[in-house]
Amino acid sequence: MRIDVVSIFPDYLSALDLSLIGKARASGLLRFDVHDLRDFTTDRHRTVDDTPYGGGAGMVMKAEPWAQALTAVLDAGDTAAAEAAPPVLVIPSPAGEVFRQATAHELAAADHLVFACGRYEGIDERVAEWAEERFTVRPMSIGDYVLNGGEVATLAMVEAIVRLIPGVIGNPGSLTEESHADGLLEYPMYTKPASWRGRDVPEVLLSGDHGRIARWRREQQLARTADRRPDLLPPAGP
Ligand code: ADE
């Protein structure tokens, strides 16, 4: 998979060199490039923003540097592959569709993802319209709160996506047993010692009875989901 990120703060993304993503890059499963939006400006001050039409607080990112940057990313890519399946342009925004585990799976199947990290009050709306001709455009929110820009949201989405690429995680079983894999929160986990500061590991986990353990874990998943995230439970039948 190929991932490009465009940002005015490319250093933000360097955290992705650590750990899993760094290994995926080193092993050749992932090509990951970060581009500085200011390299695509033409004025002396490398201006990327301007005041909003219609008035209001804050600044809006100008369209032309984005068109230049995204065109450069496309030109550097595999044009035959892009014609067969257009790259996905993810625009992090609190006004986007909510990014979920199912979205991570969908995006993990793409050949080429491009993340456009806006700052200030966002990017001139015409960029998304223009990009529709070249990309599949997905405005995405990571939750109902407002960040200062798209970089932190991109870090979260890239990590969630890349760990699903086959070969990136050493033990793929861990992907099927974690929270959200089956629409529920995961069951509680314990490790040695069996008794710690007066708290014992649930007896069933020491029983060696795999059927009982599986049933107990399922009950825990349901109870925990009902308690913490009742919105995830399927509606009760008639
Ligand atoms: N940019 C600012 N807030 C955001 C959010 N909640 N999700 C994605 N991008 C954002």
Image (cartoon, grey):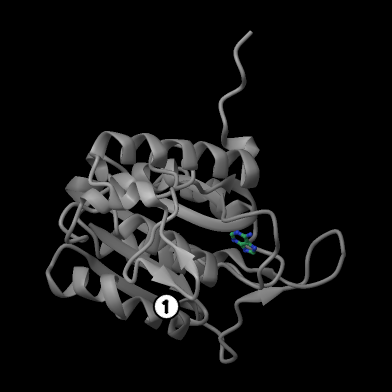
In the rendered view of the protein, which quadrant contains the N terminus? Answer: bottom left
In the rendered view of the protein, which quadrant contains the C terminus? Answer: top right
Judge from the rendering whether residue 24 lies leftward or rightward of residue 52; answer left or right.
left
User: Of residues 126 and 91, which is closer to you in this image?
Assistant: 91
Q: Position of residue 127 (x, y in %)?
A: 56, 55
Using the image, determine if residue 117 lies above or below residue 80.
below
Mark 1 surroundings within 10 Å by alpha-carbon count, few (fewer than 14), some (14 through 19), many (20 or more): some
Give the mark count.
Answer: 1
Which residue sits furthest bottom? 44
Q: Position of residue 215 (x, y in %)?
A: 37, 34
Residue type at mark 1: give it.
Answer: Leu
User: Of residues 9 and 181, which is closer to you in this image?
Assistant: 181
Please tell me in which quadrant of the rendered image residue 235 appears. Answer: top right
Q: Which residue is mark 1?
A: 13
Q: Position of residue 232 (x, y in %)?
A: 57, 36
Ligand 1: image quarter: bottom right
Residue name at image x 35 percent, y 55 percent: 161
Helix, strand or loop at label 1? It is: helix
Residue name at image x 13 percent, y 67 percent: 28
User: Of residues 15 and 179, which is closer to you in this image?
Assistant: 179
Please tell me in which quadrant of the rendered image residue 157 appears. Answer: bottom left
Q: Position of residue 236 (x, y in %)?
A: 62, 19
Residue name at image x 21 percent, y 60 percent: 169
Which residue sits furthest left? 27
